[in-house]
Amino acid sequence: MKYCKYCGKEINASAVVCPYCGCQIEEMQPAESGGMGIAAIIFGALGGWLGLLFGIIGLSTYKTEKNRKNCKIGIGLFIGWIILWIIIFANT
Ligand SMILES: [Zn+2]
């Protein structure tokens, strides 16, 4: 739940228009294809450079928090692999 910034009443978190005062809560965001974020996660999980690449491109183009988060996860997974590889190589 969140609160309307105009009238202060509690409203549904996904509401775009406040049901009490009718004010628009959030700007309607144009639908954004999340493909880049998904690709970042998939390639990042596989430890591929594309995960980092898609993540960086996605972060620089996406405005939606959900898609940006996916990109960050992809980059995070890739960094995780790098750390893992460093540990493996350091021990051989
Ligand atoms: Zn309101």
Image (cartoon, helix red, strand yellow):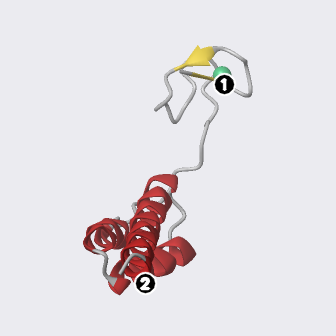
- The disc placed on residue 66 is none
- The disc placed on residue 53 is 2
Which residue is pictured at 39% across the width and 65% down the height? 77
Q: Amino acid at mark 2?
A: Leu
Q: Quadrant of residue 78?
A: bottom left
Q: Quadrant of residue 25?
A: top right
Q: Nearer the viewer, mark 1 or mark 2?
A: 2
Residue receiving disc 1 = 4
Which residue is pictured at 44% across the width and 79% down the height? 90
Spot occupied by residue 33 in the image (x, y as percentages of width and height): 34, 67
Inter-mark Cα distance, 1 to 2: 38 Å
CA neighbours of label 1 inside 10 A, class few (<14), some (14 to 19), many (20+): many
Q: Is mark 1 within 8 Å of ligand 1?
A: yes
Q: Does residue 77 appear to the left or right of 11 in the view shown?
A: left
Spot occupied by residue 11 in the image (x, y as percentages of width and height): 55, 19
Are the two marked residues, 1 and 2, in contact with CB atoms closer than 8 angstroms?
A: no
Q: Does residue 12 appear to the left or right of 47 in the view shown?
A: right
Q: Which structural element holds mark 1?
A: loop
Q: Does residue 31 appear to the left or right of 9 in the view shown?
A: left
